[in-house]
Image: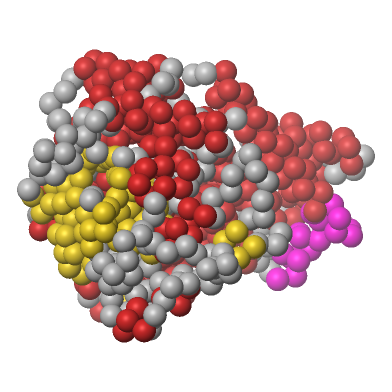
Amino acid sequence: MAVDMTQKPILVVKDLNVHYDTGKGPAKAVNDVSFSLRPGERLGLIGESGSGKTTMATALMRLTRAPGRIVSGSVELDGQDLLKLSDKDLREVRLRDIALMPQGAMSSLNPVMRLEEQMIDAIVAHVPNLKRPELDARVQQLLKQVGLEPEVARRYPHELSGGMKQRAAMAIATSLSPKVIVADEPTSALDVVVQRQVMQTLGRLQDGLGAAVVLIGHDMGLIAQFADTVGVMYAGKIVEIGPVRQMIEAPKHPYTKLLVESLPGIEVKQALVGIPGLPPPLVNLPTGCSFNPRCPFAFDRCRSETPQLQEVVPSQFAACHLYPDHKELPPLPARATRELHA
Amino acid sequence: MSKEIVRYIATRFGQLLVVVFVAVSVNFIIPRLLPGDPVQTALARLQTSGGAANVDIQAVSAAYRARYGLDAPVWQQYINYWGDLLTLDLGVSFANFPEKVSTMIGNALPWSVTLLAVATLIAFSVGSLLGARLAWPTAGRGIKSLVPFLMVLTSIPFYLLAIILIYFFAVVLKWFPPAGGVDTTRIMRLDWATTYDILEHAFLPCMAIVLGNVGFWALGMRSQMVNVLGEDYITFAEAKGLHPRRIFVWYGMRNALLAQVTALALSLGSVVSGAVLVEVIFNYPGLGSLLYVAIRGQDYFVIQGVVLMLIVSLAVLLFIVDLLYPLLDPRIRR
């Protein structure tokens, strides 16, 4: 579905900060993140492990748990700040307006309840007056939508395969036609074939509902295929965000460039390349740009001043001091990527 | 009932029969491993201690020889033993000759079973609920301050607790009678006065068992619940917008209880043996007191009968727990 760019955004995240309290001080897992999402838009968020993706996903639904803590910012869903809602209102908004497709679908279903019980649980929490036959019909319809057989309703989670569990979680997530679906690495535990099927089902359902999707993951290929817009996270910040094609063909942030370069191609056999160095510890971020210790272009300003997102080319934003002095990202120096010897 | 459930029950029942068979056989073999004639030895000991001075020793001895055919070959005795058991004949008491052991056990059993069942049920449910509450993130300071108290309770042995309870509630405050199962002058009838009397006498022994166990269940449940609350299905349940109470009971406790029931099955033995001591201290007319008096009086067949009874009832309890498992955890229905 084409996104109507004239529509008002459905989800607006502003200056979101989530910290984990540790003995050494707060770990800034989500650091001043802002983005917005229009109805029907598919936003992919990519990042390495520990870049704050999952923390961000849980914070969007205010599911953050101790030692995690949402420090500041706002998450406005249809004009309503989720971070300011009462617990009761928040419960009503969850699933009805913003739904989670969990990371570990394998372990996201209650092992001692039949699938239909868990689906009905979710529906009844929001629409309390439905009769059992109506609920059963609804369950059947939802299962059909995600490509599961009707008899699956009577099964327990341990009687389902990984792909079936993920579909079941998807059926629950879409049961009340939410406006926004937060999909946190929904397919990371599945093999590529099932992965593709599940993503296709998600895409089809989302089109039907007109819901916006935040897809979080580390698989650049998968996200590039699914998303309209891609955001790249590094050390708790979005360092670059823009339309998917532009992001892959002409990345503006050095980190995005290195990520794209490190994608292995299947036709040409070449040495695996990675990005030298490791992500910084979130408790003790480098001053200036968090990426400066690993950046091949880093200069003095990068080590002292934190770059803000700026529009480098229309609708593509990057947080990098190379701009606006440069028009394009300069070619990478020869040794910027490193061969990984297996 | 599906076919697999029937098979499950059949398997577990088979296991119960095996346990009972082995218990009965061991109970038969052990006395016969001792050198000499157990009847003679026991009677001789009674005679020297003068404990049975006005009992006709020869008559007792003859009764046992005739009854158990102790001159017969061992296999014959074993078969006779089974025959006696199946007709509920456990022999007669030395100390209270000629009262039958089966009658004595029959009189004591209801007291023990009721006391133990009620006390364990209360301790288990209160402890589990308390433990689950302790693990829940919104647990207040008030409930959290119970933890050290619970730890102290678990580390105090049953019988010490019983003595403390008797001292405060029976001796100092005089709220409850200090001992016995019912007022000695009471004529047992099915009326309110009798029921009240029984409950009044049962309260302190019951409290001793409950207090002695509740900490164990609460602390066990707390650690189980902490684990369960870290599971993805709890986060997903929250994301579904469920009410916290529903998550607490059906997603949290429901899963944490699985390990609790396993612990219940494993600890039944110690619960039963602990209750024996409590009965002795409160002079409660149950199996525990019967066993204690029998041991002190070297009332051989009573000891054998009570021990057999305890083993069999433990086996039956484990069987019941086994039957509860598949109701609680669908993954066990194989």
**Would you say residue B201 sits in the magenta stretch?**
no
Front residue of A151/A14: it is A14
Identify whether B172 is placed above or below A178. below
Front residue of B257/B227: it is B227
Residue A173 is left or right of residue A291, and the answer is left
Residue A18 is left or right of residue B101, and the answer is left
Determine which quarter of the picture holds residue B220. bottom left
Q: In the image, what residue occupies the spot 71% across and 59% down?
A: A342
Q: In the image, what residue occupies the spot 22% across and 73% down?
A: B141
Residue B253 is left or right of residue A269, and the answer is left
Q: In the image, what residue occupies the spot 27% across and 47% down?
A: B238
Task: Decide whether the magenta segment is chiefly helix, strand or loop.
Answer: helix
Magenta span: B31-49
Identify whether B225 is placed above or below A148. below
Residue B152 appears anywhere in the view:
no
Locate the N terminus of chain A by quadrant.
top left
Q: Residue furthest left?
A: A79
Residue A167, image x, y percentages:
41, 30
**Would you say residue B38 sits in the magenta stretch?**
yes
Residue A205, image x, y percentages:
31, 27
Identify whether A7 is placed above or below A82. above
Q: In the image, what residue occupies the spot 41% across and 72% down?
A: A291
The tally of labels here is 0
Residue B182, image x, y percentages:
34, 55
- The color scheme shown is secondary structure
Residue A77 is left or right of residue B138, and the answer is left
Identify whether B131 is placed above or below B17. below
Residue A300, image x, y percentages:
36, 84
Front residue of B49/A17: it is A17
